Image (tube, rainbow, N blue to C red):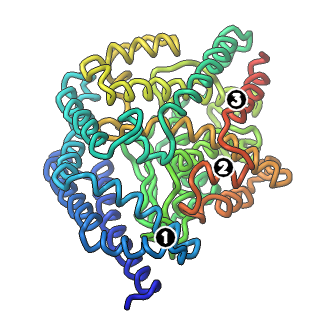
């Protein structure tokens, strides 16, 4: 007779095998973005499609289901310890979702998205949305079908959102985003009327790419990124990917005239990477070795990029080093002026280059569009017109072309519908988490000024990273802060910071 120990050993072995397969797929995606030759796209799409199909078939196999049902009986009889309960319940949740998706559908979606990504890149390069239309129509059709297969209570979008932010609904997000949008539009209006004028182009210059790379590596290392367990490369769209806690990779992109085009991305992606390197290696292959949600993951990148990386105390340490490495133009700019320049607020076309005040309006716009797309109230052909209209309404910005508008993000070509709202959720989580960290760590920001980030990183690791999926996102926030997610922390953070900078 199989014991509880036998069953869980079997489960862990199967999950480990699946995770290794998933790592191989992730490596192929990374290579596709970083090194793969242009003509390799079609074959790569088929390779990824086949591996994703194998993963899916293994995960929903009759044998695996039989094993899970045996463990379900132990769960019902309350014979599982806390870690076993987490592993089983999260695996069962994912299994139940995947079981509803036919293998042929999974392979078709993977191949369609893999092909679409190279077409999206070409369409963006040529600023021609029409090139991408047939591929995006197919993806939307497949994602609508996926929602129907999985099932939902109120909106088909909820079925897709659940993949990235479990237990969150589009109705909850709509309420939070409406309140946030009202606040953001209001404060942006006040900043526009401010007498304080900031010129971020004062930070532009001629920056050697080799020196930029060295600076990026230095900052990332000081934050705690372990280069013995990771690497940094170049890609069109900066990203972080992890194959296991001992192989975590980040990418960035460069402009010779703008140092922060690259550095901001590096700080952001390092925040993601610290989460992945903070997961316990012994839990690889188990939900205990996986991040809670995309929103919580994003909180780690935004807390480092914005709340820490654009904090005056952060630059009290790094700015002298920046001036030494790049005397032009920084030797002529004092720290206070520099701080205001990096926190310059102005509505812009590009999400990834936007400031922390206007950024969430970019996300709210995308959330509203993709929700309507999946619900069928708008169609793919309508996107440029709707996109441009919302950009004008929310940000007061006129979109000149598709490349700087509807084609700027990679997400839809990868089928990642439901992903965008997690960016703003991440901002809200980050402010609430940082408030808790400041209460827990005495003189935290003074430590930043001294170049000491270990205490903060370890606090994040102990309170978030090492737990894997032990908690739900909301459960974790409750555990850390004593209350559910609230936008008030982010609102207060933005209001207080920019009231001072712009003398509002």
Question: Camera-side residue: 446 or 86?
Answer: 86
At which x and y percent is residue 188? 64, 16
Horizontal and vertical percent position of residue 159: 38, 42
The N terminus, quarter of image: bottom left
For the residue pair 171 and 431, the one nearer the viewer reads as 171
Q: What's the distance in space between the residues labelled 2 and 3, CA to CA?
A: 17 Å
Q: Which residue is mark 1?
A: 76
Nearer mark to the viewer, of 3 and 1: 1
Q: Residue at x 63, y 46 (%)?
A: 304
Closest to the observer: 199 or 248? Answer: 248
Q: Give the labeled residue for mark 2.
A: 477
Report the label total: 3
Q: Which mark is residue 58?
A: none
Tell me which residue sits at (77%, 16%) in the image. Answer: 504
Asked if the residues shown at circle 3 and circle 1 are in contact, with their CB atoms under 8 angstroms apart, the answer is no
Element under disc 3: helix
Q: Spatial distance from mark 1 to mark 2, Cα to Cα? A: 28 Å
Where is residue 55? Give x, y as percent: 26, 63
């Amino acid at each position: 007779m199989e014991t509880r120990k036998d069953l869980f050993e079997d489960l862990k072995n199967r999950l480990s095998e699946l995770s290794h397969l998933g790592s191989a797929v992730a490596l192929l995606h990374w290579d596709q973005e970083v090194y793969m030759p242009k003509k390799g796209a079609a074959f790569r799409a088929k390779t990824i499609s086949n591996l994703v199909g194998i993963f899916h078939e293994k995960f929903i196999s009759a044998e695996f289901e039989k094993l899970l049902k045996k463990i379900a009986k132990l769960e019902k009889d309350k014979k599982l310890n806390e870690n076993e309960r987490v592993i089983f319940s999260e695996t069962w949740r994912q299994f139940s979702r995947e079981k509803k998706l036919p293998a042929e559908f999974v392979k078709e979606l993977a191949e369609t998205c893999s092909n679409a990504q190279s077409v999206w890149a070409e369409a963006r390069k040529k600023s021609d949305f029409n090139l991408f239309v047939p591929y995006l129509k197919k993806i939307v059709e497949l994602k609508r079908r996926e929602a129907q297969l999985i099932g939902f209570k109120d909106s088909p979008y909820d079925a897709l959102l659940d993949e990235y932010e479990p237990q969150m609904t589009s109705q909850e997000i709509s309420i939070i985003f409406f309140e946030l949008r009202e606040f953001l539009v209001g404060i942006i209006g006040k900043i526009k009327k401010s007498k304080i004028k900031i010129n971020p182009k004062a930070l532009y210059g001629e920056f050697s790419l080799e020196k930029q790379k060295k600076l990026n590596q230095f900052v990332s290392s000081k934050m705690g990124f372990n280069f013995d367990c990771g690497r940094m490369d170049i890609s069109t769209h900066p990203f972080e990917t992890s194959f296991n806690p001992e192989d975590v990779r980040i990418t960035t992109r460069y402009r010779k005239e703008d140092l922060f085009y690259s550095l901001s991305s590096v700080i952001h992606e390092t925040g993601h990477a610290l989460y992945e390197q903070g997961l316990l290696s012994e839990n690889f292959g188990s939900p205990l070795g996986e991040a809670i949600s995309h929103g919580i993951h994003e909180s780690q990148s935004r807390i480092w990029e914005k709340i820490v990386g654009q904090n005056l105390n952060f630059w009290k340490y790094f700015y002298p080093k920046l001036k030494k490495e790049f005397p032009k133009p920084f030797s002529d700019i004092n720290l206070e002026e520099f701080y205001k320049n990096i926190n310059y607020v102005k509505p812009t076309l590009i999400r990834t280059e936007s400031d922390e005040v206007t950024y969430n309006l970019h996300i709210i716009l995308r959330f509203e569009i993709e929700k309507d797309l999946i619900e069928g109230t708008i169609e793919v052909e309508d996107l440029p017109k709707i996109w441009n209209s919302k950009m004008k309404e929310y940000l007061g910005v006129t979109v000149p072309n598709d490349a700087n508008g509807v084609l700027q993000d990679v997400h839809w070509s990868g089928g990642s519908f439901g992903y965008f709202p997690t960016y703003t959720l991440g901002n809200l989580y980050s402010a609430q988490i940082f408030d808790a960290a400041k209460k827990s760590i005495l003189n935290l920001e003074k430590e930043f000024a001294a170049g000491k980030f270990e205490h903060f990183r370890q606090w994040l690791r102990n309170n978030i990273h090492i737990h894997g999926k032990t908690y739900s996102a909301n459960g974790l926030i409750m555990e850390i802060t004593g209350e559910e997610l609230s936008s008030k922390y982010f609102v207060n953070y933005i209001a207080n910071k920019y009231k001072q900078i712009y003398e509002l």
